[in-house]
Image: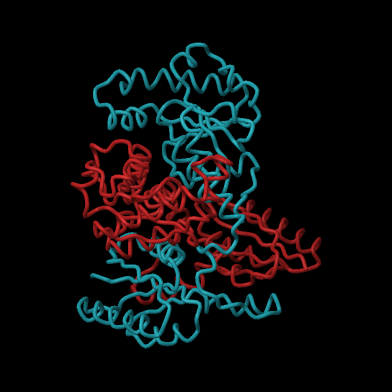
Chain colours: A red, B cyan
Amino acid sequence: MKCSVFFVSDSTGITAETFGHALLSQFETLEFDQATIPFVGDEDQIRAAVQRIDAAGASDGQRPIVFSTLTSPRLNEILRESDALILDFFSAFIHPLEIELNRGSSHAAGRFHGLVNRASYDGRIDAMDYALDHDDGSGARHYRDADVILVGVSRSGKTPTCVYLALQFGIRAANYPMTEDDLDAGNLPALLAPHKERLFGLTIVPDRLRQIRSERRPNSRYASLGRCRKEVVDAEAIFRGEGIQFIDTSGSSIEEIASQILQRTGLTRRSF
Amino acid sequence: MKCSVFFVSDSTGITAETFGHALLSQFETLEFDQATIPFVGDEDQIRAAVQRIDAAGASDGQRPIVFSTLTSPRLNEILRESDALILDFFSAFIHPLEIELNRGSSHAAGRFHGLVNRASYDGRIDAMDYALDHDDGSGARHYRDADVILVGVSRSGKTPTCVYLALQFGIRAANYPMTEDDLDAGNLPALLAPHKERLFGLTIVPDRLRQIRSERRPNSRYASLGRCRKEVVDAEAIFRGEGIQFIDTSGSSIEEIASQILQRTGLTRRSF
């Protein structure tokens, strides 16, 4: 069975995709042919979307599924003319919220992923600049400005996690790669010692580390299982010895790693 | 009026936050006191969450609002014992989807932001590595592997957009900053010419550019309005002369810029 799925939005479509993906992930044995129709701002555009949806349904011989985050009741009404299952995010929830909050909602498009809250947005971009300026041990003189400093061996997941913490949560995260010299010394590098309370360790199963490093530098000493195993054992010994909390990233996505770091450190999202 | 808002999830809480923020952004005059309760996996944990929600309501003198992405019907049932407005994402939509698709859903936790689809996840991380390795004009010898190459003057938004394209969509985006030499030459740098069909320009209003640059290097020639204005005019002249499509990033978030790039280039999300 081929089933077409559309994410229809008056803005970027990112909320519609998140909304739809979260639901479709509960039907993991099915394959969906997915497309996003963003920036739908007027009746002509929604009518064009309806035509596209109906054409897909006719071609599939199966009603498409449509996830809509259109905020306009009028545009949603036109969307409902298509022969599809319409799952309409705002209609489902905005009414109970209006009653609870005892006021009407703005029905304004593009509020969530737009530049509505400039300070919050600028905070995310500043945090991202910070993550990139303080990646891989650089910029240590500004560690006092970090919300958290991730430490771990090379390719344990520090950089993508720092960037995600910045983009999603506005958190300023630096990262420091533990070198062979650091690991052989068996204690915290002098650079990190003054910031101990903001350190958070990432570790990884040696075999997974070998695999990731092999993709970058096949058949190198750097990627050898022996080297990976020794580095991980040494890094974890330092974390334990210094009382630095750490998590294993092997089976986790960066979303999961980042969320766990927030939960364990008690850091507050800055980008609300 | 103080109103507490909770995002309750059996996984990272990121979908619950997206779900809630999208709705709350429609009530922009209100202030919400927001907290996320992630990784709620059993009855003890949901009962602890209910206590925390009820305590906030008692303290506020106002029922809290709870956005739940719990997939377990049993945990949602316990959540409903709290004295709060419960907006339950899965319950609202999973039933019509089950009927439409003619099968039960898995009710499995952590499917969306977890490592369910390893290939798709690895693609996002590879794309992020690619974006960082090809940031700011470096790694040009690998431009042939790029899905898109963003060009524009310094601080026009290239780097955060590339990283976002990678993380959110799995798109491999390189970026090239147009230097004064490039701009004075008045045509495409030789490095970029072979990849013309994958170039996408970012421009920005000179006064906004001056403001962004001034935060980095106050009172510099680099941040002067005259310099910003000349660079922007020269860059746009090259875009027009070479037939490179471009957008103005001044009033847009990186989510909006990234979505517009996908829409205009027809690039397909790789991370579905």
Relative image position of residue A173 (x, y in whole percent): 32, 48
The answer to whether A172 appears left or right of B93 in the picture is left
Relative image position of residue A34 (x, y in whole percent): 66, 58
Q: Quadrant of residue B180?
A: top left
Q: Residue at x 66, y 67 (%)?
A: A65
Whether residue A221 is situated above or below residue A267 in the rendered picture: above
Q: Is A234 in front, or is A80?
A: A234
Outermost residue on the top side: it is B185
Q: How many marks?
A: 0
The answer to whether A143 appears left or right of A108 in the picture is left
Q: Quadrant of residue B115?
A: bottom right
Relative image position of residue A221 (x, y in whole percent): 51, 41
Whether residue B53 is situated above or below residue A62 in the rendered picture: below
Whether residue B72 is situated above or below residue B38 in the rendered picture: below
The answer to whether B166 appears left or right of B105 in the picture is left
Relative image position of residue B229 (x, y in whole percent): 39, 21
Quadrant location, the N terminus of chain B: bottom left
Quadrant location, the C terminus of chain B: bottom right
Q: Residue at x 60, y 59 (%)?
A: A7
Whether residue B105 is situated above or below residue A209 in the rendered picture: below
Q: Is B241 in front, or is B11?
A: B11
The answer to whether B168 appears left or right of A192 in the picture is right
